[in-house]
Image (spheres, rainbow, N blue to C red):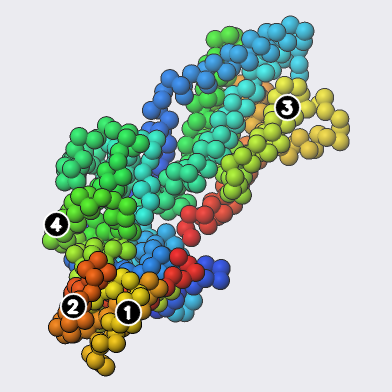
Amino acid sequence: MPVSDVRPPSLGLRLYSVWFRHMRVYTRNLISNGLPPLLEPVIFLVGIGIGLGRYIDAMDQLPYLVFLAGALPVTSAMFTASYECTFGTFVRLDFQKCYDGMIAAPVTVRDLFVGELLWAGSKGLFFSACVVLVMALFGALPIPMGLLAIPIGFLTGTMFGALSLLVTSFVRNINHFSFYFTGLLSPMFFFSGTVFPLDSLPRYLRPLAEILPLTHAVRLSRSLAVSRLSGALLWDFAFLVLVTVVTGHLAIRRLKRRIVV
Amino acid sequence: MPDPIIVFDDVHKSYRDVKAVDGISFDVAPSICFGLLGRNGAGKSTILRILYRKAERDRGPRGRVNVFGFDPERDELDIKSRTGVVPQDDNLDEELDVGQNLRVFARLYGMPRARAEARIAELLDFMELGEKVKAPIRALSGGMKRRLVIVRALLNEPRLLILDEPTTGLDPQVRHTIWDKLRQLKRGGLTIMLTTHYMEEAYQLCDDVLVVESGRAVLRGHPKALVAEHIEPFVLELTDAKLAPQVLARLAPDSARVEPAEESVRVYASDYDVLRALADGLPPGDHHLRPTTLEDVFLKATGRRLDARQ
């Protein structure tokens, strides 16, 4: 083949190759990686839903179990994507020098991280699908509408992947991720309408909750699952996309400087 | 002369206040082995990284880089799809085994599966790793990892192979195996560009070398020609500097060149008999009379003392 005939792979193929690498690593330990996303919602359901739920009749006009089950698919997606794009990315970037190897193949730094975000989204999708499955088995989510929470898991995973990549681009010491998890993600879990409706927050805190990205993911997931459709959901959808694009763009620009020196 | 595969023209690259590459120009002819020599921090690796845009050269009116007719700043994918890279660190994917590492890379190169499998088997055999296809990366020795990285770099049938210190830290057996393989690849028409600290390696493999010092080119040519043109053919090494005064007192003026170092002295001369006469009567453990090598040329060109970047 003469040298002029060589064509670099298409964008789709490049992104798929990066995604494939992550999928290959993840599925190597299918049992240890595949069980927790199924077990966690069961534990949550039993511990909180059934235990605590007996003392709460209804929340936001929904049985408490259903109220919770509408949010758990996306919180699960949030945590898995955040781990993947903080600790996971940092180890690949700093300890394994995995990106340094990959960048010698015909992929750009942008391809590497867009592919990684698609993987974070896929993990989000897989985790929320597990949650929906478990919840449906326990009768906590109606089927088929509950299935709509699954694609929202993909969006949530991609968004928290992007946000986490941005955090990672600032981090030089792997221990510093605890600030992000304890300082941002844990409070977000409680103050995004996950375990209680935002109406219960003091009036002056509500605008703050509206800034939290998880708020919009939870609202989308729960509303779709319990068929409370309204035009306002389009705003929540736009919010997710906007946060993903903006933080993803900034993250890739900053991470590029750590790979292309 | 055929068109060069790589053109580097007045290229600059700075890191904060350090100029890693300070106006270097050279070109590389096809199907040769081109070697970059220089001490640690001289700018060798940076030059390689600029070729496949692992590093960005300084922007500005000056400076042009061309690989296969492409500029890495504009067409990095076109360059990378024709090039194999063996970086200084073996950055293999430790979460995957040998075969999976290669399959992931075959996908990155966009190779169809059947061709990838055939190529993987062929290259693992070529590099004598055929039995390791299912081995985890951690179970490989340093020499195996190095050979595997070379396999990875060859997957896509590249026209150019870039190697950053291919044999540093490896034992002589592995080093000679790698040299043999690189020679075979060159005979097959592959262009090879490498950096090395081993003058022996450059002498064995390279058809053209560039000596770099503090980001500048200081010497260029065929290794044999460099030894023939830039250094006297013989050297007497006195490994005990205390011997030097009595030996040098017997030296006729202008018959040799004396190069003192801290604990030793080297006397270079064109006439073997001059040095032979000097060496006569010295204790055998304290001197060594030998033909000069590329290492002598290198040290003459770049100096014997350590600099701050090392």
CB under 8 Å between callouts 1 and 3?
no
In the image, is residue A142 above or below residue B66?
Answer: above
Q: Are marks 1 and 2 on the same chain?
A: yes
Q: Nearer the viewer, residue A89 or A122?
A: A89
Residue on which disc 2 sits: B280
- The span from disc 1 to disc 2 (Cα, nearest Å) is 14 Å
- The span from disc 1 to disc 3 (Cα, nearest Å) is 81 Å
Q: Nearer the viewer, residue A253 or A236?
A: A253
- The span from disc 4 to disc 2 (Cα, nearest Å) is 45 Å
Q: Nearer the viewer, residue B10 or B108?
A: B10
Q: Are marks 4 and 2 on the same chain?
A: yes
**Callout 2: residue from which chain?**
B
**Callout 3: residue from which chain?**
A
Q: Amino acid at mark 3?
A: Phe
Residue on which disc 4 sits: B184
* Image point (60%, 13%), residue name: A43
**Callout 4: residue from which chain?**
B
- The span from disc 4 to disc 1 (Cα, nearest Å) is 46 Å
* Image point (45%, 65%), residue name: B310
- The span from disc 2 to disc 3 (Cα, nearest Å) is 89 Å
